[in-house]
Image (cartoon, rainbow, N blue to C red):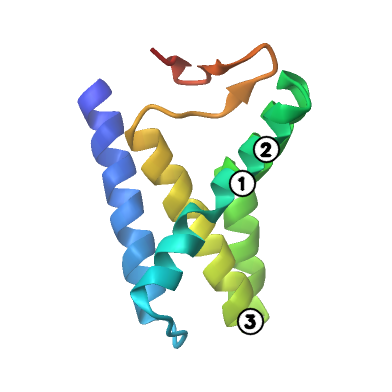
Amino acid sequence: MKTTLLLEQIAQLALTVIGLNLLPISFPWWIWFLLFFSPDISMLGYLINTKVGAISYNLFHHKLVAAIFIIIGYFLHENVLLTIGLLLYAHSSFDRIWGYGLKYADSFNHTHLGNLK
């Protein structure tokens, strides 16, 4: 089952990267790199406490939030919103490939995928 879930995340990452490539938005590669990892800024919430950290992390790593941006961007023909949604979705899939799931309020290492080592 673990392999199936890993393959699912890899497929979702690949599909979102393909979607980003099809958009008429163009940046240098290093900007895409920065944008791809920008949701991790949400970890700064952990400087306040684990509850605020979990809330801020989960807000930027929840696939439903990403899907809402994708849907709104698609139907409003707003490529910026669509790009934000695809980037959030791609980043969330990337994190899940490495075992970083949504966080519980008690600890950064306690995720919906299990405990990080």
Report whether residue 11 is seen: yes
Between the C-alphas of marks 1 and 3, the distance is: 24 Å
Q: Earlier in the sequence, mark 1 or mark 3?
A: 1
Q: Residue at x 40, y 63 (%)?
A: 33
User: What residue appears at the point 67 percent right and 69 percent down from the top-left corner?
Assistant: 72
Residue that mark 1 sits on:
41
Residue type marked 3: Glu
Q: Position of residue 3 (x, y in %)?
A: 21, 27
Can the viewer see residue 1? no
- Please tell me in which quadrant of the rendered image residue 6 appears: top left
The span from disc 3 to disc 2 (Cα, nearest Å) is 29 Å
If the image is split into quadrants, where does the C terminus sit? top left
**What element does badge 2 sit on?**
helix
Residue 35, x across and y down, in percent: 50, 63
Q: Is residue 104 left or right of residue 92?
A: right
Residue 82 lies, in percent from the top left, at 56, 71
Q: Nearer the viewer, residue 97 or 33?
A: 33
Decide: few, some or many residues near mark 2? Use Cα within 10 Å; few <14, some 14-19, many ≥20. few
- Which quarter shows the N terminus? top left
Tell me which corner region of the image, top left, top right, bottom left or bottom right, holds residue 30: bottom left
Pair 3/2: label in front: 2
Query: What residue does disc 2 label?
Result: 44
Report the side of 30 relative to 25 (left or right).
left
- Foreground: 58 or 63? 58
Q: Are marks 2 and 1 in contact (CB under 8 Å)?
A: yes
